[in-house]
Amino acid sequence: MFKYVLHRFFKNKKSYLLIVIIIITFLIMSISPYLTGSFVDFMINNKDVHRVVYLSSIIMLIGIAGVVLAYCKNTLSVKITSQVSFDLLRDITKHFEKIKLSVVETIDSTYLTQQINTDVNVITGFVISNIIPVFMNVILAMTIICLFISINKYLLVLMVVLIVQYQEGTVNTRNKIS
């Protein structure tokens, strides 16, 4: 099912546009905190009003571009998810046409149709909304690790130890609640 959804996703021509928009949106959202921090540092150290207005305009335009691209990403994602779901439902319907009538009559058709429709929409939505961000988050994690290594290796070790302790604490808390 996973391979089928991915195959149908990449068969759609708009999927490549969606990937490009996701990458650009990811870069904008990753760079925005740095730009905002640099802007605050600049305002503290520099009193030139024209530069402040110029930099704030750039940050505003980047923010607006991020919002517009996020809207385009969501709209395109819904269209592609609907198309892939429709294709999958069409193929399942074609498969049911090949099944013997005696087998089909033993099944509650309303329940089966509802279950298939729900499963197809959930699987398609999950695959399309989570596959590309997983790769982007891996790249972001590697970038953060490289950044920590360039700043201070001891800081990286400290962060890893703290993350492991945080994860263990979270798991232990969940086990106690359950």
Image: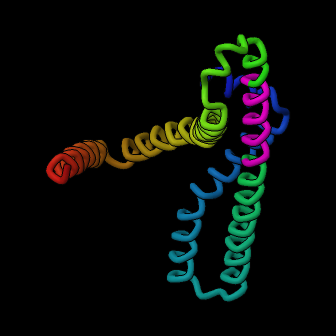
**Residue occupying the point 20% across, 49% down:** 178
Evaluate whether residue 158 shows in this view: no
* Residue 80 vertical placement versus 65 (above, below): above
Q: How far across and how far down the image is residue 63, in percent?
A: 68, 68
Residue located farthest toward the left when viewing the structure as drawn:
176
111, 144: nearer the viewer: 111
Q: In the picture provided, is 35 more to the left or to the right than 24?
A: left
The location of residue 123, given as percent across then percent down, is 59, 35
* x 71%, y 11%: residue: 100
Instruction: Where is residue 164? Give x, y as percent.
Output: 23, 43
Count of numbered badges drawn on the protein? 0
Q: Is the residue 31 above or below the residue 121 in the image?
A: below
Q: Where residue 104 sits in the image (x, y, percent)?
A: 67, 20
What residue is at 54 percent from the left and 64 percent from the top? Answer: 33
Decide whether the magenta segment is chiefly helix, strand or loop: helix
- Give the residues drawn in magenta, as a range: 78-92
| Residue displayed at 53% across by 38% down | 134
The question of residue 48 being in magenta is answered with no
Q: Nearer the viewer, residue 120 or 168?
A: 120
The vertical placement of 1 against 44, above or below, is above
Query: Quadrant of residue 58 in the image?
Result: bottom right
Q: Is residue 82 visible?
A: yes
Q: Quadrant of the N terminus?
A: top right
2 left or right, relative to 54: left
Q: Quadrant of residue 126?
A: top right
